[in-house]
Each structure stands twice: as C-alpha cells, then as structure tokens.
Amino acid sequence: MNVRIKFSKYGMAKFIGHLDVVRYFQRAIRRSGLEAAYSEGFNPHQLLYFAAPLGLGETSDGEYMDAEFLLEYPVKEIKERLNAVMAEGFFIHTVTKLAEWKPNTKKESVMSLASCADYMVSVKDVDVEHSGIVKPYAEWLSRMQEGIKEFLDSDKILVEKNTKKGRREVDAKPMIFAWGFAPEDIEGGCSGISHAEQYKNGMRLFLKLASGSVENLKPELLMEAYCAKNHIPYKESALQFHRMEIYCDLSLRNMNHEEAREAISEGKRRREFVPLYHVGKHEIEA
Amino acid sequence: MRKLALSDDILLSVEKPARYIGGEVNSVMKDLAEIEIRFCMCFPDVYEVGMSHLGIQILYDMFNKREDTWCERVYSPWMDLDHIMRRENIPLFALESQDPLKNFDFLGITLQYEMCYTNILQILDLAEIPIFAKDRTEDDPIVIGGGPCSYNPEPIADFFDFFYIGEGETVYDRVLDAYKQNKRNGGSRADYLAMVAEIEGMYVPAFYKVSYNTDGTIKSFVPDHPAAKPVIRKQVEMSLSDTFYPEKPVVPFIQAVQDRVVLEIQRGCIRGCRFCQAGMLYRPIRARDIKFLKEHAKKIIENTGQDEITLSSLSSSDYKELPELVYYLIREFERQKVNISLPSLRIDAFALDVMGKVQDVRKSSLTFAPEAGSQRMRDVINKGLTEQNILQGAMDAFRSGWNKVKLYFMLGLPTETEEDIEAIAELSNRIAQEYYSLPKEERGGKVQIVTSTSFFVPKPFTPFEWVPMNTEEEFLAKQKIVSAKLKTLPNARSIRYNWHDADVTMLEGIFARGDRRLARSIYDAYRAGCVYDAWTDYFKFDVWMEVFKKNQVDLKFYTSREREKDEIFPWDFIDAGITKEFLWREYQKGLSETVTPNCRKACAGCGANVFHGGVCYEERKEDWQ
C-alpha cells in the first residue's frame, strides 16, 4: 500500500539535516515493525519520497513523505506505530492511503505535487550576553511591522536567487500569494503552528509562497532582501523559519513541467490550493 | 523539551550541529532528583568516531541499569566549536542533560589509540576540569581512564585519578558503591581513591613512586601508599553469555563511521600473532553463546532499526558456530533487508558463499592481511597464513566473480631484510598473475589490487615489546623499496600502493612504550596547539618535535632502543595474565623463525589460564586450522 505521511519536525530536531532525516525515517519504520517495500538490487533501500527538503535550522508542522508498505494496514495503526518509535522532535500528524496506481501510468511523485507552502517567520529572543546581533535586530523589531508592510506592498520585490547561471535578481512579487502578521491573514494559517517555537517578543510574519519545481521562493530570500533594502545586516539564525503546510495547486496537477510553466507565466493557473494530505484522500474517495 | 547548551546561533554556524544535541533514539534521560551518581562517558574524538565504539555502548547500558546512576556521553567538539567555546567561555557539556561536565561525579575516558592523548586534554580543558589530577579539588569530577591504552597508562598517568585496567563488566559496581559509601561517610577525594585502590584492577597512579637509572630506564616502580597494590591484575569477564550487552544501543542521527549494529561474538584470539597487542591482551579467547547472539541480534535490530549488522571479533573464523550464526542472520533479516557484514574473516569456501550472498561481488573487494611478504617473515611474526592459503583463497574468489583485492602488510618487523620487503611487491604481483591465468571468459575485467603497508610499532604485552622500532629514515627507505620493486613487476599496472604516514607512527611508537616523564610534553604540545593528532589535517609533527626537544626527551630512547631482557618496563606493574617469561620465549622463537601453534591446537603456556576459563579449559584439537 502507498501512503502519504504528514509530520512535524521541531525543537532540537531542526539541527538534523535532510539526508539524516531520510535515514532516521528508514530506521523508524524498521523499528515500528511495519513491513516496508524496498528497492531492488544489492543495496536495497526503503521506498520513501519526500515532498520538499527542509533547511537546517528550520522547523515544520507540514512535512510530507510518501511511503510504500508490503502489507495493508489501517492508516490509524500506521500512525500509532510510527509515533510509538519517534524521537523527540518528530511527530506524525496524518497518514493517508493513496490510490493504487494504474499500470503503465507515471507515478505521481509527492515532490511534483508541491507548488505552494505556508511559513511563519518569528524573530527569536536573542540572548543579549552571547550575541553580537542584538542591536540591529532590536532596532529592526521596533519597526518591523511598518517596514515589512512597505516592503511587501511594493509593486516589485527584487530578490537575489542562486540559479544554475549564477546569482540573478528576480521579482518575488508574483510568488507571494498571501501574507500577514496574524495566522488568519493567510488562508488555512490557523493550523500548522502547533509545534512551532514561541518567543516572548511575539513578532511573527505569515507567508504563503510559491514552493515547487516550476516556481519557488524561499522565505529566507525574502527576509534577506528585506534586510538588504533596510540596511540591516541579515542573520538567518536570528529568525526562526517554520513551515506550516505544503499545498498542491489542483489547476496544475495534471500538467507536465513545461505546461505548468506556461500556465503560470500566462497567468492561467487558478491557485486551487489543497494541502498535500488531502490530495491523496481525494483520490481514494474518487 | 530539553534546553540545549549551545544557542541556535552557534549550532547553525558549526559543521554537523547534530553532533552536540543528544536526544538520539535510545539515549537515556533520568530525573536528577532520583539519582545519586552522575557519570559521563567520553570517547576523546569527534562524535561520528566515538559513536561507532561498542565499549561505550556496553558501559552506558550497564551504568544506566543502576537506578542510582545516570550515565551520559561526551565526545570531542570539532575544531570549529572548540574555537567558539573558548571565545565565549562555554564549558563542555554532556549530550543528554546538556549540563556542564564539571557538575558530574565521574568522567570516564576510553583510550582507544595513542593519538587521542591531546584530545583528552582538550576535553578536560574545555570542561574546566584541572588537567593534572594533582590540581583537582573536592568539587571536580573523578577522572577515570580505561580501554586498550590503559595497558600502558604511564605517559598519561598524571592526567587521571585512576585507571580501570581490563574489561568494564566486572567491578564497576564496586567502584560506584564505594563512591556512595565515601560520600555518606563524608570522606574526601583522597579517601575515595584509597578505597578504589583496594579494588582489584584499579590503578591510582598518584600512589606509586618511580625512580630511574642513570641510563633513563626504570630502577624501581613501587607503591607509595598503604592501599596501593604492587601488581594490578587486569579485569576479565569470564561469562560473556551472562553479562551486560546493550539491547537498545543509541542510534545517532548523523552517520557514524561505523553506521551499524555491532554484535561482539567473542573476545580474545587463539592465533598468537607476535606483533598483535589485542591478541595477547584479551586472552583467553571466550565465545558468546550462539543463542545469546541470535536473541540479541534480533532485539537490537528491532530496537534500533539499523540496516546493517556486523559481527565483531579479532578473528571471526575462529568462532566455532560461525556458519550457523551467519546463515541464521541472513534468513532472519532477509525481509527487513538488514545487511550482514563480516570483517576479519578468513577467505575459504564458507566465506565466499556468505560474501556472495550478502554483497555485490562486482563491487566489493576481498581482504587479505598477510602482514608480511615472505614466508620467513610470517614465521617470525607467527602469522599462520601461507602463500598457498592466500593464492588459493584469491583464486577461488576470482572464480566466483571477484576482481578486487586488498592486501595489508607491515614494514619494519624484527629481522626484516630487503628480500622480505621485496616479497610484499612479489606477492601482490603473484595474485594478479593468478587472476590472469584464468581463461579470459572466466574473468570479469581487469584485476585491481590495492597493497597497503603500515609501519610496525612494538607494543607492550607482546613478544616484541623488547624490539627496537625502525627509525623514520629506515621506514621511508623500506617503503621506497616496495615502490621500486613494484615498478619492475609485470602486473605493476594492476597494483595500487598505499602507505601509512611515518610521522604519526613515530609518535605512536613513543607513547606506546612511554613512561610518566612524557606527560609534560603531552601537556606542552597541547598548549602549543596540538589536538586531533589522529587527523592528518590537524597533526603537527613539527610542534611535537619542538616540544620533545625543549623537554629534553630522547625519542630514540623510547623507539629504536634495544631493551634488555630484564629491563623494568613502565607497564610491568600490570598483570595481564600472560607472563613476561612467555612473551620473551615467544620473542626468541620468533627470532629463530619458529611457529607457535594456535591455542586450540596446543597450549603455549602463556599464563592466561589463571582466569580459569575460555579456551584454556577446552579440549585441544590437533586439526584446528
């Protein structure tokens, strides 16, 4: 059976890099006693597919991976057995059974489905004793609300992106789907922060951004550009990036990469965002 | 949620921050209100190396089984964090609680290789524990050393409160109980060490006095305290199937060097290779019961989810029920795709069958450790492998599809001649030649041979403990002979030659048979910036040489000096079972190129029978190969 697993990565687990998270889950599944499917060959590995790697230092309540098991289990049992073997910093939210794939059709990868993600950016309470970054960020904090508003409301938001051809400036504006200072300001924003770290200063920014293979905007780039514009030295470790959810844009779902690119550039996408766990559920009900 | 000792800012600025966060699967958390003893186990090298070590996992499990004790772990901070901790005055902390080490009752440091000595000082220094034991106060943790290098603890004796000589399973309970008792009695640190000195196997260096002859050799080595014993008997766990073995070893988040479950099938070795310290120290050979191993293998895989299990021992082929165990593991773990790895396996029909089942023949390579190139030399070192064995094994493997071979040799063995050295190249060439004697259709492409040489370091408690080590110049000249000879041979292009660094070997040689007078130099070298000496990028040979010069240490005294039969060695106060008479006898037999049969064939009278068990009390078998 194929399942889509939604999980949180939080607390000290944010210091574990993506490849180690993959290894961690392979072991967790073996500890759970669930019979996983393996690849062929002399170095067989579990068939696990992740939607989008999370950067080192970032937390999330909306991570996704697809897994394949040899036996049929009730999804509730899979969730319980996995949660029973999780280390601190990992939690399984939902397990969705995916539809069987018709033979001779291309398997829909969870990575290709992703096209949008919600983020919460918090300003950390920086330790006055141990940090040289306190002053500029305290200053920044005091005028963050107005500064961010001005920055995100402008017609064009230039960010520097690393591409295959080197660093180049792109306009981030079309890749910002919604933003606000309260979770309600972005659709679906009220869920997805259950394991996020809380800071006393309370300064948070919520962002709904393009996040997929065709267009992708990392919240770090946006914050970096904001800092650059406001002459604040950018320090990534002073901010906590938390992913809340990953969505599929149903209007792009059945398109290949080129078609999706065209639809986006011609403004034909409809932004029918559905959380990834729902995409699988939808399928099984159909 | 646990609070980490390091800020996000620091953790995100260092390499692999997961080295410092703890919280791994199966790591143990306890409530401080419910325990009496805080113990921190330390492997003085980087996390990925330290987490690969079985010994710490055994002791960690054993200590944490005690309700009154919480055992945690610490490893050497990598140099990036080292700099930050010094700059920011952050004391070194244990992984589990993230509390400073200086708050602990004990710091237990495992001594796996000589090149970690400066890392011990780094740990103490960063932990804000006085480096010299004599400077520690009632508030400082008791610092214990253990592991292979504690069989000659003298070069680092000044840094430790005491050493646990031998296997940890036996008397640690008494060591910890004594601590509690002393605390209840309101006793001091000195009182406690006096209690420890009464326990068999415990060596408190401060309780001994060493005097020297004018030539620098030891004149006397005697107890200087009423509690200290003149001879320290090594600790041996004689019932390996009825003792501590972790069923839930800690699983690191990041990839360890040995990223697999380790199943120790036996301790000790019957082979008696004369250069091998482990083979002599861990006598007598004691096997774990196959039932114990099968059960543990299953439980450990269940509890860790690891995808590989390795059988550990000095010579796996000497485990009598090896085929039964291996075929069981292959069957048992087939569905979960757990890979089985078998180092130290003699290449025979069974080995080839198993390896064919568990590895990709085309990608994996075959390993032989002839240790010496010529039969004469192998007789000197008592390495029972013949050229016939090697060629036959290689040929069988070639026929089964292998075409990669790794060969391990040593340079600088006693009585070595130019012919012996050239024989290394010749043997490598012979193996390639054998490969090409196969008809073309039976060959899988070109043969690839990797020949590696290391330099021989004479070690305490071996028959070669008297032997002069080669000088650096001699080593390098010998390595050149191998290189030059290889070039003249027809299959040179199939053979890649690697050699070990001679500088590091010299330092190893100094410490292996060193004495107390070296502590000052280790301290000075550390202060001059030496740390992570086992890592080529950090090893500062020049600094070491300057420090030795400044302290007037005559390196040749420790390395290339021929020792007299009756010389008092710094490690002679340790009774490891094997007697000095036996070692001398073996040395003389080696010089006369006489082979000593393995323990299963005939008893060589080494003295290890004082431990009342193991192979010493089994029936001998004339035909044990």
Image: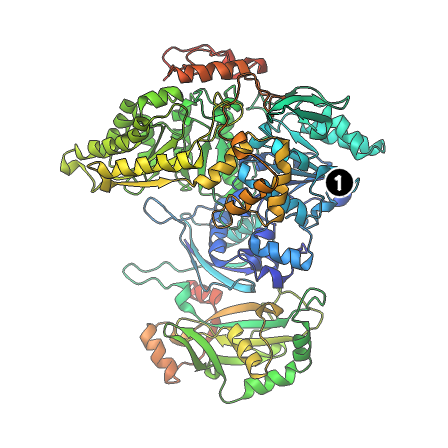
Q: Amino acid at mark 1?
A: Arg
* Residue B579 at least partly seen: no
**Residue sitting at the far bottom:** A155
* Residue B20 at least partly seen: yes
The residue lying toward the viewer, choosing from B140 and B564, is B564
Q: Residue at x 85, y 34 (%)?
A: B186
Q: Which quadrant would the N terminus of chain B be assigned to in this image?
A: bottom right
Instruction: Tell me where residue A153 sits by quadrant.
Output: bottom right
Q: Residue at x 36, y 36 (%)?
A: B477
Left or right, A166 with respect to B70, comes to left
Left or right, B67 with respect to A32, comes to right
Instruction: Provide the chain ID for the residue under circle 1.
Output: B
Label 1 residue SS:
loop
The residue lying toward the viewer, choosing from B369 and A64, is B369
Residue A162: horizontal and vertical position, in percent? 43, 73
The relative height of residue A10 versus residue B92 in the rendered view (above or below) is below
Instruction: Tell me where residue A183 sits by quadrant.
Output: bottom right
Mark 1 sits on what residue?
Answer: B136
Residue B253: horizontal and vertical position, in percent? 53, 50
Residue B573: horizontal and vertical position, in percent? 63, 21
